Image (spheres, rainbow, N blue to C red):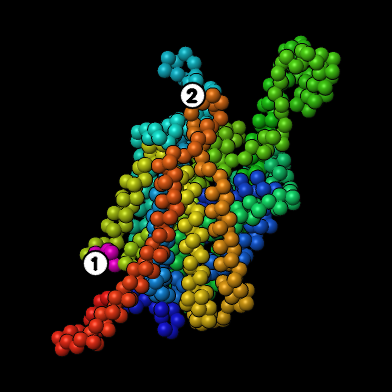
Amino acid sequence: MPEEGMEDNKEGEERPKWNNKAEYLLTCIGFAVGLGNVWRFPYLCQIYGGGAFLIPYLIALVFQGLPLLYLELAIGQRLRMGSIGVWNSISPYLGGVGVASMLVSFCVSLFYNTIVAWVLWYLFNSFQEPLPWSQCPLNHNNTGYVEECVESTPVNYFWYRQTLNITPNMETSGSLQWWMVVSLATAWSIVYICFVRGIETIGKAVYVTATFPYLVLTIFLVRALTLPGAYEGLIYLFTPDWEILKNPQVWLDAATQIFFSLSVAFGGLISFSSYNSQKNNCEKDAVLVGVINSATSIYASIPIFAILGFKAHTNYVTCLNGNILALTNEFDISDMNITVENYEQWFDSLNGTHPSRVSDLKLKTCDLQTFLDQSASGTGLAFIVFTEAVISMPGSQVWAVLFFIMLFSLGLSSMFGNLEGILTPLHDLKLVPKWMPNELFTAIICLLLFLMALIFCLGSGNYWLEIFNSYVGSVPFLIIAFFEIIAVAYIYGIGRFSDDLEFMTGHRPNIFWKVCWLVISPLMLFVVLVAYVAVQAQTPPTYAAWNPDYVNFPNTEVLPYPDWVFAICVLLSSVPVISIPLVAIYRLICCMSGRHSKDSLHNNPNPYANEDYVVELLL
């Protein structure tokens, strides 16, 4: 552990620096603001009482998210190293924390860029007229439409069959889908081009990738507010259901959402801040990035819910028009007599005078609230719900192109942080030969990640991606963050850390930050971790399979994971963080061996022995 506070990089090597503060902040914001802000946060608001969800969300932001974000930016800026170098400097026994961050970033990069590849595939297809998911394709004989599409919807068919070509279960792997391989290769090529010269090229790319999503969201907001049903969607979003706050699952999901949304524990933020001048006010940076990230989630929810309200309104009107047509034909009523506005009066009248005839029509139950309650998150929101809503919007091609360019920008800027969390620690470990240019090393890592990610291009790839997302992107992050905050607050010492902050910012941290680092944040992390594991243990792991032969098709078939797949799930949750105890044990053994060797040299003097060399080698 260092003697006099956190020190500069001892290697004496010149470290790259950001060209200006704007590039650094945009990179951090781009890394923190990702796909989850657009498709996860609105879903949580939808299922957890609308505006009421903001209460636990903001509490988690203040007492858990911001302290962790401030801590990571501060240690990276002070030490000017990546995650492995940082934690090795604080204590050699904590080197496994940096290794764990690197392994998690590696695993997340695998599946995250696959989602970017899916976005690219949809973006390419958005230039077609009509949109390929707006209607069912003809069968091989050109005598009708494909049965699977007719039984489900064109949107579902395009996603599950024409994009994923998904298998009916995980145990059926299927073959590589060439169009997905090409899209994945394109996604990794773009990431490499933007990352080829490190922060020099990243700093230029983020001017577009970090700002363009806000432009698109604003355009969508203006357009969405003019759509029919937008008002109902916004009312649904902002009407709080206070009773739901009694459900502990709400607080658990709020804590995990703010934690994952800020992208702490990846190691990317530590690396980005390490390129700063040490006399930078990292406290303001942390608050700014955290507030902008959460404000973006709320801002994105407004156009999303306005468009979901439009979709619900459209489905509601379509449902009523089907019933109106049935009543009009059955009772020989003149066209346009029954309208959406007077449908209830006509139905009550006809049902009162001819109940049996109305009953035989088997009219659908049309309820706007039911359509609003149809929630979806993740890929379900982006590639199914939203694409279906776009079809009904005038100029659907334009809106589809804008939407998927926005998702691509969000995904690309997040990938910068993921890749930085891999490359910088590898440089810290001196695993890169000095003769190898950084451009070549980056290319090798990107190629390796591309080849490993080909598993997600199989017919069963979507099932595997959900596993990686659920098990790599959950427990490991909580464990890493817990050890990070314990390491700084209790092993390094809050007093010494305060000295470092005073050196960098010009003032010592106030009582709020100290109480959070010492008590509140680690306690919240521990409670969330235990609760998360307990909730997962109570529910047998299952997955939703798309099986055209399923009895209740087009509903997805819920299947349990095979035992061998469940074993992989456990490994994905544990292997990235197993390095934390392993490195600590290894360091302890080396320390004990070094002391034993030193004692042996003292007890058996050897005039030819170089004692200092032996001890240094072992330590």
Where is mark 2, residue-wise? 549
Q: At 37% across and 33% down in the image, what residue appears? A: 174
Q: At 39% across and 33% down in the image, what residue appears? A: 172
Is 166 situated left or right of 507 in this image?
A: left
Is 84 situated left or right of 280 in this image?
A: left
Where is mark 1, residue-wise? 434
Q: Residues within 10 Å of mark 2 (few under 14, many from 20)?
A: few
For this rendering, which residue is in front, 185 or 530? Answer: 530
For this rendering, which residue is in front, 515 or 262? Answer: 515
Q: Residues within 10 Å of mark 1 (few under 14, many from 20)?
A: few
What percent of the width, then of the height, locates residue 307?
63, 40
What percent of the width, then of the height, locates residue 117?
42, 43
Is 350 situated left or right of 472 in this image?
A: right
- Does the magenta run of residues contain 574? no
Residues rendered magenta in the picture:
430-434
Three-letter residue code for mark 2: Asp
- In front of the other: label 1 or label 2? 2
The reply to whether residue 240 is visible in this rendering is no
Q: At 45% across and 67% down in the image, what residue appears? A: 270
Quarter assignment of residue 396: top right
Q: In this picture, is 375 found above or below 323?
A: below
- Does the magenta run of residues contain 433? yes
Q: Quadrant of the C terminus?
A: bottom left
